[in-house]
Amino acid sequence: MLTVLAGAALARGPDAGTPNPAWLAERMPLQLPVLSPGDLTFKVAAEKQYLIFNLLAGGKVAWDRGDWEGAATRWEALLRTPGLTVELDSLVRPLALAAREKAGGKGTVSLPPPPIEGVTMTPMDEPSATSPAPEPKRVVPTVQTVSGTITGGGSHGPGGAIIVLRRADGSTPKPRPTRVKAIVQKDKRFVPHVLAVPQGSTVEFRNEDEIFHSVFSLSKPNDFDLGSYDQRAVREQVFASPGVIHLLCNIHTSMQGWVYVSDSPWFAQADLTGRFSVKNVPDGAYKVEVWHEWSTHPVLKDLKVVAGMPEFTAAVEGDRQPLTFVPDKSGKPRQSQLGY
């Protein structure tokens, strides 16, 4: 490789009658004995430095005597030498461009891009004038579906449990918010009774009763008050912070519901039997949180997501006691309103 480069760069000699200086030689390969692998390594390194020196100095000699084509040819060959340092490239590149311009721009060839500090290019890495530089490979993460069963929940059962996966070996990406998820007020109930949404989502509260409702929550930092609204009226609320929101109606003390706002894109809600499935979970280590409205504390478990992993299981308690009183919008107790 070095011999070919040297031959191409030195093929055009100086003008007739103008010999090279005695110290500028052009003979390759060097006459160094090779008796061992170490000798071969030494010879290759010596020939590379010899080539760099001759191309660098030979270009300068040609420049000084006005041989612009000779200078351009040698310096362009030098810039194509694998492993050229950033310092030497920055010195030679403008000289090569200037020599090529003085030579009339004839025979211009494509030059490789300047080297990057700390990055060593090999001959296989070097882009050529005939083939484009290879595009970097795009790494597509392997993803799995995490399925399983939640049990427990006391007499209420496991239905409605929220399962959230967060990375334990890196940062968890923010979920993409949904535009509208609906919670309907029907027969003085919240339908669905529990709703899980990604952080930043907008939830629509729609009254389908023939009476007024006044939905609010005291759960900070997602506390809100939609005021009183009649049948067919719709109110919207954006839930910007993750957490659990307890829904109440300021008119009907029997109405209670829940919104779980997830700060992870990997979450699901268990059906009435406790079954759930979370799709498109990248391989890795996770912390799993299982929340249930009738459990005082969420269940926390470790999970390794890989192909062929067993199903996830967790048991939630049903130990949370009902509210001793249902608060109004100011947090004060109020009496249950029978028949309304």
Image: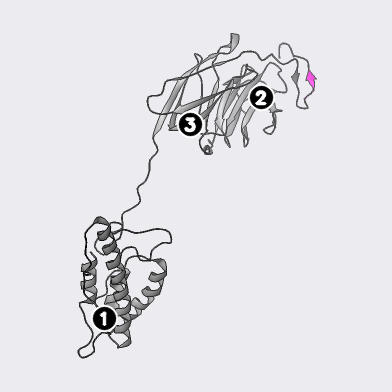
Residue at the location (21% across, 80% down)?
12
Which type of secondary structure does the marked residue at label 2 adopt?
strand
Please, what is the three-letter code of the amino acid marked with disc 3?
Ala
Please, what is the three-letter code of the amino acid marked with disc 2?
His
Give the vertical position of 26 relative to 244 (above or below): below
Is any part of residue 212 visible from this angle?
no
Question: In which quadrant is the N terminus drawn?
Answer: bottom left
Q: Callout 2: few (<14), some (14-19), or many (20+) C-alpha neighbours within 10 Å?
A: some
Q: Callout 3: few (<14), some (14-19), or many (20+) C-alpha neighbours within 10 Å?
A: some
Q: Is residue 332 magenta?
A: yes
Give whichever of discs 3 and 2 has the lower sequence position. Answer: 2
Q: Report x, y in % for residue 313.
A: 49, 18
Label drawn at residue 285 = 3
Label drawn at residue 141 = none
Could you say which is closer to the camera, residue 170 or residue 176? 170
Which type of secondary structure does the marked residue at label 1 adopt?
helix
Residue numbers of the magenta segment: 331-336
* Eye-nearest disc, 2 or 1: 1
Residue beneath label 1, please? 70
Residue beneath label 2, please? 246
Which type of secondary structure does the marked residue at label 3 adopt?
strand
Real-space Cα distance between discs 3 and 2? 31 Å
Give whichever of discs 2 and 1 has the lower sequence position. Answer: 1
Q: Quadrant of residue 127?
A: bottom left
* Eye-nearest disc, 3 or 2: 3
Give the vertical position of 241 relative to 249 (above or below): below
Q: Callout 1: few (<14), some (14-19), or many (20+) C-alpha neighbours within 10 Å?
A: many
Please, what is the three-letter code of the amino acid marked with disc 1?
Gly
Q: Report x, y in % for residue 178.
A: 53, 35
Q: Quadrant of residue 186?
A: top right
Real-space Cα distance between discs 3 and 1? 61 Å
Report the side of 175 relative to 27 (left or right): right
